[in-house]
Amino acid sequence: MKPLNQLESLGQSIWLDMIQRSMLRSGELKRMIEDAGLGGLTSNPTIFEKAIGHSPDYDEQISRVAKGGATRDEVYEAVVIEDIAAAADLFRPTYDRLQGADGFVSLEVSPLLAHDTERTLQEARRLHGKLKRPNVMIKVPATPEGLPAIEQLISEGINVNVTLIFSVDVYNKVAEAYIRGLERRDQAGKPLTGIGSVASFFVSRIDTAVDKELQKKIDAGNPELKDLIGKAAIANAKLAYESFEKIFGGDRFAKLKAKGARVQRPLWASTSTKNPAYSDVMYVEALIGPDTVDTAPKATIEAYVDHGRPQVTLTQDVKESHQLFDDLAKAGVDFKKVTEQLTTDGVKSFADSFEQLMAAIDKKSGAVAANRHSSELGQYAAQAQTALDAMIKENAAQKVWSKDASFWSASAEAQKIIANALGWLTVPKLMAERVDELTSFATEIKNEGFTHVVVLGMGGSSLCPEVFSRTFGKRQGWPELHVVDSTVPATIRRIEKSLDLKKTLFIVSSKSGSTTEPVMFHRYFYDCVKQVSGADKAGRQFIAITDPGTQMVQDAQKDNFRRIFLNMADIGGRYSALSYFGLLPFAVSGGDVKEFLNRTLKALALCEPNSSPEANIGLRMGAEIGTLGRSGRDKLTLVTAGAVQSVGLWIEQLIAESTGKEGKGIVPIEGEALGAPDVYGDDRVFFYVGVGEPSAEIASKLAALQKAGHPVLKNVLKDPLDLGAEFFLWEFATAIAGHVLGINPFDQPNVQESKDNTKRILGEFTKTKSMPKLQTIAEEDGVKAEADEANAKAVANKEFRAVVAAHLERVKVGNYIAITQYFDETPAHDELVQKIRLTLRDETKCATTTGYGPRFLHSTGQLHKGGPGTGIFLQLTAADNPDVPLPGEAFTFGVLKEAQALGDFESLAKRGRRAIRVELGTNLTAGLEELLDAVSSRVKANV
């Protein structure tokens, strides 16, 4: 029996809550009907806004119809009618087989008419007349003005899907309008057969609203109310079904039924779970019963087909459902007020989506937007095209979206890791459903007068907020966003001094919930806040973002955090930018999350399986980057400019940690200023990412590089809000590049080693109060060169400058030079580091990278250890004076930083990497100048 037919045998039909032209053209919808037993389909303005506004599928028709002189409304209608008619035709065999009992497709009247009975009637009649299909339903909202329209339409024999029902009281009114419409039709001597109607009763939105009210009361000192969380929606639906059985099982309807009338089936709408802590099929499984419909998005249907349990559940625990609402009333939850607000918000949400849809049609009516990606690959163009063609032939995009782990690896162990790391594909759509949650929380924080928001994280949990902070700066009236991702005492002190601790919200971010740095940041800043705000209030200034079930959840509960946001567990840290880890800090600092995600969804649509190969930017980027890397052009030089200049930090981590393993890897070069063609080797690729076309200076340099034979690629953004789209494109491209390179881009096998080294060194320090020592090779003016035994022997010399020169003599063609620095990141320090790296590049023609520790350990650190052994390393450290103590620990931040630096060096040395450490002494600026002088002297000696 087909999976969904098992529900059909229990009296329930599953309808798909989406429509998109690509599904119609590719045959995907037909397969879902024939292979899975899908029973119908619904649409609404939000669904069409996503389909049309965020996809190129409709561009040609919109442009063509608009050029013919059609108005905006006429363009909209032409597009929508075509999709609904095509879908209805696909469901027609189902409708005929079941003699009109199922197989319906729904189209909504304009939500702008929700409070206008007469215009709703006119629109419904016109749409019904245009479609001319017996299995089409017209959707009308259950507003006071919509109810008389519903009655009238039923009396005229027009099928109606009544939407936006949130309460049993409103449901009863809808059922009454349906029955009255049938009675009027019967009195007029017209047949009752062939009329279909459903009452769309919304589910998950109930829990979202009620749980929010309960959480406020729990936070106010009523922990016993936790037992009521997550139960209102199912209980509400069961009471509606109880009412349905009474109404349609009574004598009044029996008379109509005898004349051929069908019951108005309850349709459970919004049945995807919004809370990641809940089962993804929770609402579907709880609401199964005869004469019902469940409409769900594709992901929920697929989840149910995979692990749903078909059994009648609607008639279970009805008594307990009544008791729940008594308990809610006693708790002070005004359920009537909640549902009235949901109706108002629902009408407004659909109206907003409709306006956005019309705006998108306006834009697309002129011309299809230009492709944001371009590439000039020279001699490598044919190879890249061959790789792209091969992936098109093997349906690579489909394999990625179907989460086929074998696309990346044949290893069963690797496939387990991959299968639990692909949530980034769908998280933008999931977060788009949570925009109201994000903006509501952001407004709450703003209204409480917070002036600063500080993310306490590391690597994947902090780099995206860092990009947001540098890109958007402080927005008027909103808290200023900061990021703490350094254990360097000077950095901790500097950021702490910039804050008003009483008005600062701290976001402790960690996927694993046990990463050392966020744990220590939490302890330190929680102790600071307790001292100024009091132990009883400190928790209100902290929230956590972590995976379900982590140690951080327990720690946050113990410290009475204001809120815990549970992220999706199937997303790796470096792929988490478009989840709570990136979007919550963005929202709380005043970011336009809605528009940000709208643009992201457009990029996502370009990468979906049904997008044309020409439009699939992510697939093309991945084929190009992977092919170039495999051909020896493995130094991906990021040319980021303008407002989005800092995005290179995020791309650097994504590329390095995803591809640097198994002795392979693409080396991302971030922050290295552009030079003339003669300072580069033939291992370079240049990739421009910026708002608008490159400036005249950058364009000129890129043209010269291209002329010299270097591949040049470009991604042009409209404005900084396009960053979400850029994040997704790079994520998709990196996944594809991993396939081209033959590696698993979703693990990080060598990151843990440095963490383990650090933990061991800290354990030894706790016992002995001393740290391991590297061998001192040379010392001059307070600056020391140090290394392990093998590296010390390779560069042995009595003078510091000679040691540096000997180390740099080890550089070979095709290598890269990595400077890793463990000190405070300030403009003055960074300027000196950049002078050192550019001097090295210009002399050796080797690519150079820099990274502030311990941040880089969670990004390029994986590449340094697991990637090709082509790196030559300069680790820079400085004395910490004064140090910063850690509450409850036997070590300080300075000791932690030193342990991380030593642990990192130990990992490099273990792999035979060419590395020395330069201890810059107590005067950091003087130490950097000394190193710059040593590097420059080596250059002059070789001119």
Image (cartoon, rainbow, N blue to C red):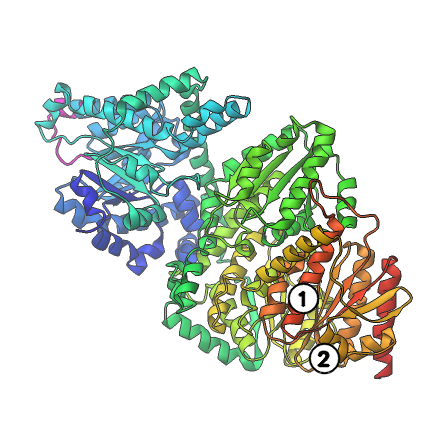
- Give the structural element (helix, strand or loop) at label 2: loop
User: Which of these two is toward me, 542 or 375?
Assistant: 542
Q: Give percent across and percent down for residue 792.
A: 76, 75
Amino acid at the residue labelled 2? Val
Q: Give percent across and percent down for residue 212.
A: 48, 29
Above or below, 334 relative to 853: above
Q: Work out which residue is located at the far right of the displayed protein and give it.
A: 781
The part of the chain drawn in magenta is 184-196
Say left or right for 922 vs 455: right
Q: Is residue 33 visible?
A: yes
Q: Work out which residue is located at the far top of the displayed protein and give it.
A: 330
Q: Work out which residue is located at the far front of the displayed protein and give it.
A: 768
Say left or right for 42 vs 637: left
User: Which of these two is toward me, 780 or 618?
Assistant: 780
- Give the structural element (helix, strand or loop) at label 1: helix
Taking the spot 71% from the left edge, 46% from the top edge, the residue there is: 890
Tell me the quarter of the picture where residue 148 sits: top left
Tell me the quarter of the picture where residue 293 sits: top left
Measured in 3D between alpha carbons, the distance from the residue under mark 2 to the one under mark 1, in whole angstroms, is: 20 Å
Q: Which residue is mark 2?
A: 811
> Which numbered dot is residue 906?
1
User: Which of these two is toward me, 274 or 642?
Assistant: 274
Q: Give percent across and percent down for residue 398.
A: 37, 62
